[in-house]
Image: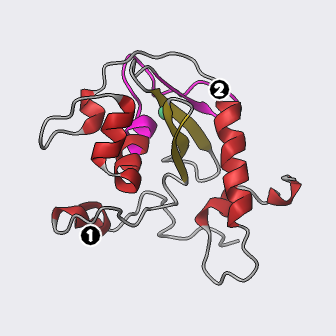
Amino acid sequence: MTDRSPNGSPNAAPIWARHSRLRVVPPVQPRKLAKVPFVELADGRLQGVVSSGSDIGRVYVSSIAAGTHNYNCSTNNNRPCGGLYGAPCKHLRALVAEAVVQYGIDRVSRYLRVDVPEGADLADCLGGVHEPAPAAVVFSRFLRHLAYLEVPDTTLPIPELHWFPATGTVG
Ligand SMILES: [Zn+2]
């Protein structure tokens, strides 16, 4: 059985993809969907779905509240993220980074009501504490988002769908 790709690591983002914005800064950059398949500014939160760094089959629901910056991260089954020990985990940092790519740092910082000094990382400027928040709402929005993606004649791979062999159960 050779069902293991030698280069199958989900973390294998090419180096140019991580550093491309050092060269050009377009208002909206292409997103790496495989890492953060869903991000939105909604319900007074920056929230979204982040793939596990180690297990391609697992996703985390991460959120940061506007104003307080209190944050939460758990699996879609509401199991607390093991990376939350008094500080935002790597999923939350990935979520913030992806939101900046998606919406631009001005819009994200305005929405969260955070001051980001020139050149600083937005994630380093948040001052919240861990506060449990239900993952189910965000996750169901993600599933609805996936349903929108089920366009009839796409020839492109849709990384989001790889986690959900049974997406047909939605709706
Ligand atoms: Zn986490």
Q: CA distance from mark 1 to mark 2?
A: 34 Å
Residue type at numbered disc 2: Arg
Number of the label disc, if any, that sits on residue 79: 2
Q: Which residue shows up at 80% across the image and 58% down it?
A: 167
- The vertical placement of 141 against 6, above or below, is above
Q: Which residues are magenta?
A: 71-94
- The vertical placement of 131 against 117, above or below, is above
- Report if residue 76 is visible in the image: no
- Report if residue 132 is visible in the image: yes
Q: Position of residue 106 (x, y in %)?
A: 28, 44
Q: Position of residue 30 (x, y in %)?
A: 40, 67
Q: Which residue shows up at 72% across the image and 83% down it?
A: 153
Circle 2: is it few (<14), some (14-19), or many (20+) Cα within 10 Å?
few
Circle 1: is it few (<14), some (14-19), or many (20+) Cα within 10 Å?
few
Q: Position of residue 75 (x, y in %)?
A: 63, 34
Q: Mark 1 sits on what residue?
A: 16
Number of the label disc, if any, that sits on residue 8: none
Magenta run includes residue 77: yes
Residue type at numbered disc 1: Trp
